[in-house]
Image (cartoon, helix red, strand yellow):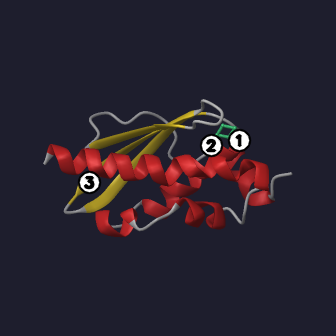
Amino acid sequence: MYNEKVMEHFQNPRNVGEMVDPGGVGEVGNMRCGDIMKIFIKVEDNIIQDIKFLTFGCGAAIASSSALTEMVKGKTLDEALLITNKDVAEELGGLPAPKLHCSNLAADALHKAIEDFRAKQ
Ligand code: FES
């Protein structure tokens, strides 16, 4: 059902865990299944220096979070805001159609974390 890249991210998720003293936090829930994703970012000089995630969800959601964190590290906030849910699914080499909605959490949570960071400045 899942391709190798999705399975690899699911089995070895990058940047998983809670961040101490994050600059911004974004949390979203998936209306379809009730799963939750939380993204923490640390920003310096307008660049995302560090990012971590906690995902209470399915394998596709965990793989999406993990892939997103790798896509985002080192990007400016404006560059990171351009990342879409579709980009995340593409980065994973695609997801099975019934699981596409699972990748929607990742970019949405990131965008919320950036909004939260900017609101605190
Ligand atoms: Fe809920 Fe995938 S089934 S995020």
Judge from the rendering whether residue 69 lies leftward or rightward of residue 49; answer left or right: right
Disc 3/disc 1 C-alpha distance (Å): 28 Å
Count of numbered marks: 3
Which residue corresponds to mark 1? 59
Q: Which mark is residue 25?
A: none
**Of pointers 3 and 1, the one earlier in the residue sequence:** 3
Which residue corresponds to mark 3? 43
Residue type beneath disc 3: Val
Q: Is residue 70 above or below residue 22?
A: below
Residue 63 visible here: no
Q: Ligand 1 appears in which quadrant? A: top right
Seen from this angle, which residue lies furthest front?
31
Q: Secondary structure at mark 2?
A: helix
Residue 59 visible here: yes
Which residue corresponds to mark 2? 62
Note whether ligand 1 is within 8 Å of mark 1: yes
Check disc 3: other Cα within 10 Å, few if <14, some if 14-19, many if 20+: many
